Image (cartoon, grey):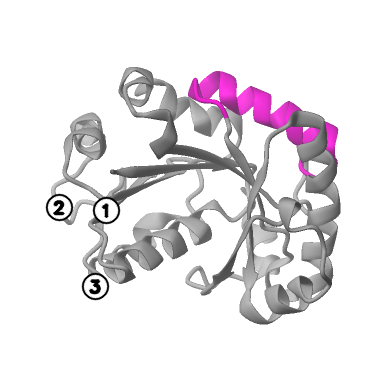
């Protein structure tokens, strides 16, 4: 049965990096995979820069800034509809940051409503080192705003705590502590903890409660950016 994963979250949370990894992993298992890039806001971390990487792995891409397959903003609706109508095994939606970015999902509310609940996964990607994501109350407030615009309910949190090139296992530990409290307050599970392999292994060796770790995902770094350049260029 087709699995659909929708990634929402704050700016700089790492949605696009995770979307790339999920798609590559799925395709590596022989799954017919589609990536929908709905991030029309952030020109710095954009999926369209990695179209070749995806197509080289036989992953299909729909992006508002990708004209390689005749996809333009004017026919994006028809292209996105293929996610629901096409014969895909795995579909990933990469959505723009914050509530305004989540608005792009709202227009497909009827389509999502027809998807069996057990196959639709809406993940809030949380980097506790980004503004408005460093404490449970802020995370939940932002989540509720994004849910309202997207007209979808978050089904799981993803701990993607990092400081880009300065990331460490301590970042994941901080993310664990914050998301454990967030999960306990909201009842929403932590479904994944993600990070570079070496940091993830160090973090997992602590023996923390797996209920607030979820399935670990070791990330390959496809979005090669520096923190200084990211902050200098803005969001």
User: What residue span does the magenta drawing correspond to?
Assistant: 132-153
Which residue shows up at 70% across the image and 30% down it? 142
Q: Check disc 2 and report its element: helix, strand or loop.
A: loop
Residue at x 21% of width, y 66% of height = 58
**Around disc 3, counting alpha carbons within 10 Å, would you say few (fewer than 14), some (14 to 19), or many (20 or more)?**
few
* First reached walking from the N terminus: tag 1 or tag 3: 3
Which residue sits furthest left?
A: 70
Please name the residue that numbered disc 3 is placed on.
56
Task: Report the residue marked by disc 2.
Answer: 69
| Magenta-colored stretch includes residue 233 | no
Point 51% across, 47% down: residue: 42
Lateral position of residue 99 relative to residue 96, left or right: right
Quarter of image, res 175 = bottom right
Disc 3 secondary structure class: loop
Q: Is residue 153 above or below residue 35?
A: above
What residue is shown with label 1? 61
Q: CA distance from mark 1 to mark 2?
A: 9 Å
Residue 85 image label: none
Would you place residue 99 above or below residue 113 in this image? below
Is residue 87 in view?
Answer: yes
Q: Nearer the viewer, mark 1 or mark 2?
A: 1
Q: Quadrant of the N terminus?
A: top left
Q: Are marks 1 and 3 in contact (CB under 8 Å)?
A: no
C-alpha separation, residue under disc 1 versus residue under disc 3: 11 Å
């Amino acid at each position: 049965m087709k699995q659909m994963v929708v990634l929402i979250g704050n700016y700089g949370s790492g949605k696009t990096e995770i979307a790339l990894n999920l798609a590559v992993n799925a395709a590596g298992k022989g799954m017919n995979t589609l990536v929908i890039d709905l991030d029309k806001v952030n020109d710095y971390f954009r999926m369209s820069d990695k179209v070749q990487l995806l197509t080289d792995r036989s992953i299909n891409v729909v992006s508002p800034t990708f004209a390689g397959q005749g996809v333009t903003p004017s026919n994006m609706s028809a292209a996105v509809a293929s996610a629901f109508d096409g014969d895909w095994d795995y579909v990933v939606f990469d959505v723009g940051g914050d509530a305004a970015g989540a608005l792009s999902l709202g227009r497909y509310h009827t389509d999502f409503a027809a998807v069996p609940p057990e196959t639709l996964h809406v993940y809030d990607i949380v980097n506790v080192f980004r503004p408005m994501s460093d404490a449970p109350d802020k995370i939940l407030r932002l989540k509720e705003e994004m849910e309202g615009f997207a007209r979808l309910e978050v089904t799981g949190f993803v701990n993607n705590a990092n400081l880009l090139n300065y990331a460490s296992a301590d970042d994941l530990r901080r993310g664990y502590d914050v998301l454990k409290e967030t999960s306990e307050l909201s009842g929403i599970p932590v479904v994944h903890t993600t990070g570079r392999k070496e940091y993830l292994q160090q973090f997992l060796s602590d023996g923390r409660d797996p209920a607030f770790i979820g399935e670990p995902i070791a990330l390959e770094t496809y979005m090669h950016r520096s923190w200084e350049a990211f902050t200098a260029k803005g969001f």
